[in-house]
Image (cartoon, rainbow, N blue to C red):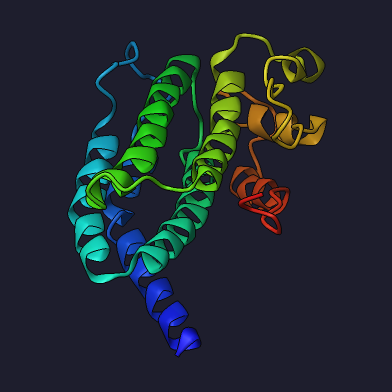
Amino acid sequence: LAALTSSTIKLLVQSVDAALTPAFSGMTHADWVECATADAQGSGFVTQIHDSLNGHFPHVANHLSSIHYRFFCDQFVQCFIPRFITEIYRCGRIGEDGAQQLLVDTYSLKTCILEVPVIAARGRQMAAAYSNYVIREMGRAESMLKILSSPVEDPEALSSLVQDPTGRGKPMSMDEIKRILALKPGADNAAGITGSAVSFMGALDFTNSFS
């Protein structure tokens, strides 16, 4: 029975994740090089994701026990955040203004995945481990975009920009920073940007995801 429940919840996660594909498609097809000044209201794809999660999570919360709902939420963010980081790489070239906008969007999405599960559960708070995981891993996306929004292109100088002041996150290596810099317009190593997403995700450690 436990295996069946786990499989069912994973199918629910896949269903909610699949519903986000149109939003992520809009994100990756946007022009992040010739991007206007960052809009504090967020990009259209963020609104789509927010609306989709607001539509799905209440139904899931209403049909699962408290412990199974928490498991669903844990599984969802472990799916959503790596996908979001991968989709950033799939945007291709990202200019400084585009990175600023995506940074605003990342803050909005972080707030969304912290708040929507609570609202859907009618105020029942998530465990601290859930919030810590979201903040830590979305912080990796924020660090990527801080690098891309900076005019600085020296990896060593940028390493101090993306240090985690809490000490909880895994430090970003020079190789990771260089792969991120390859997304900048005019970067020499245009080849392999898509492959960088796989390399970057391989660097994430999910063995103790909610520690």
- The residue positioned 22% from the left and 58% from the top of the image is 56
Residue 172 horizontal side relative to residue 187, left or right: right
> Can residue 29 be seen?
no
- The residue positioned 63% from the left and 36% from the top of the image is 190
Residue 169 horizontal side relative to residue 102, left or right: right
Residue 95, position in %: x, y?
Answer: 49, 20
Residue extending farthest bottom: 1
> Can residue 126 be seen?
yes
Residue 181, position in %: x, y?
Answer: 66, 27
Residue 167: quarter of image: top right
Residue 53, position in %: x, y?
Answer: 26, 50
Locate the N terminus by quadrant: bottom left
Residue 76: quarter of image: bottom left
Residue 17, position in %: x, y?
Answer: 36, 60
Q: Nearer the viewer, residue 27 or 129?
A: 129
- The residue positioned 23% from the left and 37% from the top of the image is 47
Q: Nearer the viewer, residue 110 or 152?
A: 110
Residue 106 horizontal side relative to residue 178, left or right: left
Instruction: Tell me: residue 14, above or below residue 181.
Output: below
Count up the numbered dots.
0
Instruction: Tell me: residue 121, above or below residue 171.
Output: below
Instruction: Tell me: residue 81, above or below residue 108.
Output: below
- The residue positioned 63% from the left and 53% from the top of the image is 209
